Image (cartoon, rainbow, N blue to C red):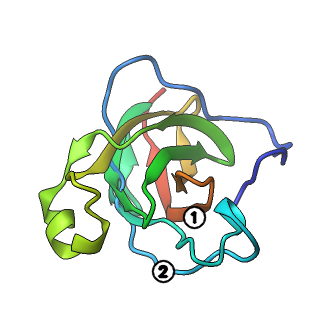
Amino acid sequence: MMTSGERNEPRSVARRPRAGGTLAAIALAVLGGCSGGKGVNDPANELPFGHVDSPVPGAEVKAESPAYGWALDDRGIKDIRIYVDGHLINSGALNVDRPDVSKAYPRYNHAHHKHGWTLLMGFDVPGPHTIIVQAVDTDGATRDIGTIAVTSVDK
């Protein structure tokens, strides 16, 4: 998991997508806690969790492709981040109603059903790529909710 301040030195083949497009991610992860005092370090703060619905592992994707899924947290989700080959290429808030997720996890409803996300990914070079989707809670705690190997088939 990449954290603030770390740098990935290899040449980037990822690019920020143009405005528009959609992406949602869903990834199931085991719930856990943070260590320490308040916020990110509050032991009572559960780490976010979720699932990446698309793309699926092994998918062939276009140079600009959507990703989508869902994420939950006991205190709320602040941000979803998408990394391609170790480089942050897009981020955004939850933007899709997912009543199915609310029904499966009623404890995390927070008086709404907006648990889904859709974001656009971009690839500069055709070939294999690794996508990491990360959820960030309102206290700044993060968890990778999906790692997906895909192949970009066009430029």
Tag shown at residue 143: 1
Q: Which three-letter amino acid code belongs to the residue tagged 2?
A: Leu
Helix, strand or loop at label 2? It is loop
Residue at point 38%, 59% (across, down): 71
For the residues labelled 1 and 2, the Cα–Cα distance comes to: 10 Å
User: Is 112 placed above or below 109 here?
Assistant: above
Residue positioned most to the front:
38
Quadrant position of residue 127: top right
Tag shown at residue 125: none
Image coordinates for residue 106, horizontal then vertical, percent? 21, 72
Q: Which three-letter amino acid code belongs to the residue tagged 1?
A: Arg
Q: How many marks?
A: 2
Image coordinates for residue 13, horizontal then vertical, percent? 66, 35
In depth, the one of 129 and 117 nearer the eye is 117
In depth, the one of 153 and 137 nearer the eye is 137
Helix, strand or loop at label 1? It is strand
Is residue 62 visible in the rendered image? The answer is no
Q: Is 141 placed left or right of 21 in the picture?
A: right
Quadrant position of residue 21: top left
Disc 2: CA contacts within 10 A as few (<14), some (14-19) or many (>=20): few
Residue at point 74%, 70% (across, down): 37
Name the residue carrying label 2. Answer: 31
Residue at point 44%, 31% (across, down): 63
Going from N to C along the chain, the mark reached first, 1 or 2, is 2
Residue at point 48%, 80% (across, down): 31
In depth, the one of 106 and 67 nearer the eye is 106
Image coordinates for residue 53, horizontal then vertical, percent? 30, 58
